[in-house]
Amino acid sequence: MAAWPVTLVHGSVTLRPIAHSDARDWRRVRERNADWLRPWDATAPPGVERRPASFRSVVKRLRSNARMGTAFPFVIEIDGQFAGQVTVGNIVRGSAQFATIGYWIDQRFAGRGVMPLAVAMVIDHCFTAAGLHRIEIAIRPENSNSLRVVEKLGLHEVGYAPRFLHIDGDWRDHRIFAVTVEECEGGMVSRLSGPTAWTDR
Ligand SMILES: CC(C)(COP(=O)(O)OP(=O)(O)OC[C@H]1O[C@@H](n2cnc3c(N)ncnc32)[C@H](O)[C@@H]1OP(=O)(O)O)[C@@H](O)C(=O)NCCC(=O)NCCS
């Protein structure tokens, strides 16, 4: 399988490349979820242009990064409906073979275990077709929902980064979680079972 562009499917969850044609759904979902997403959304630090992110600028940057091989920007669809994004970014090749993952989901679909599944699907893709070695996820200490995602996936906490990213208008501390291919024998999706399993409904 090619590393990119690629579509990954598990039950009713589909991950596919973000496209310009997602504009209407993206705007509609982001508007409806503005309060849900604001505390966790990246913002422009002082000195960087401060216009609110438009879909056009977001998709242009993501697709350009994908062409350069530094990102895999997926849309999450549930039963064909636009439900959020999971993005592999900061892909570094050479002796690192490293990347980070970021994500958000429409609150209407929250609590079904979709994001743990989507992240697991993406990690499996990164460690197989894409040949990466290490994935990191950075999470604000206050973001209990996101901390549950990495807990369900069994990622190790590897550090604490003070004032790591500019989120919701200020530099925010982050807890750093990581996984390497050696820790993923059998795959991440198959690791998701028992009480934390994803519910296909
Ligand atoms: C973090 C996030 C992606 C989790 O996605 P998800 O698909 O809901 O993940 P899960 O179903 O595993 O739920 C994780 C936790 O969220 C909480 N939760 C579940 N449904 C919820 C809802 N409707 N509203 C608020 N919180 C909810 C629960 O504590 C749940 O843990 P539990 O399964 O042990 O009860 C999602 O909450 C989100 O998009 N948040 C806003 C953006 C964000 O934080 N992005 C990540 C930045 S690091």
Image (cartoon, helix red, strand yellow):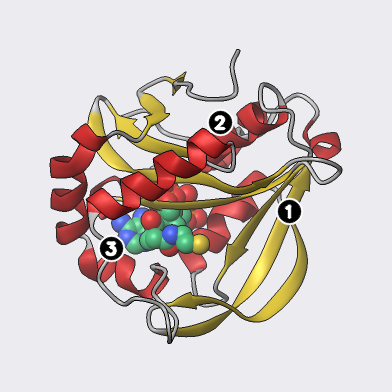
Q: Secondary structure at mark 1?
A: strand
Distance from disc 2 to disc 1, alpha carbons, whole Å, reads: 16 Å
Looking at this view, is 116 or 28 the one in front?
A: 28
Residue ID at (42%, 36%): 74
How many numbered circles does the render carry?
Answer: 3
* Residue type highlighted by circle 3: Ala
Please provide percent x and percent y for residue 36. Answer: 28, 66
- Is 124 positioned to the left or the right of 83 in the image? right
- Residue 113 in sight from this viewpoint: no
Task: Tell me the quadrant of the picture where the C terminus can be found.
Answer: top left
The residue labelled by disc 2 is: 121
- Is 49 positioned to the left or the right of 144 in the image? left
Q: Earlier in the sequence, mark 2 or mark 3?
A: 3
Please provide percent x and percent y for residue 195. Answer: 56, 41
Q: Secondary structure at mark 2?
A: helix
Q: Residues within 10 Å of mark 3 (few under 14, many from 20)?
A: few
Residue ID at (34%, 46%): 60
Q: Which mark is residue 53?
A: 3
Quadrant of ligand 1: it is bottom left
Q: Secondary structure at mark 3?
A: loop
Q: Is residue 58 above or below residue 5?
A: below
The residue labelled by disc 1 is: 178
> Residue 158, located in which quarter of the rendered image?
bottom right
* Residue type highlighted by circle 2: Met
- Is 50 positioned to the left or the right of 132 in the image? left
Q: Is residue 35 above or below residue 13?
A: below
Please provide percent x and percent y for residue 127. Answer: 71, 30
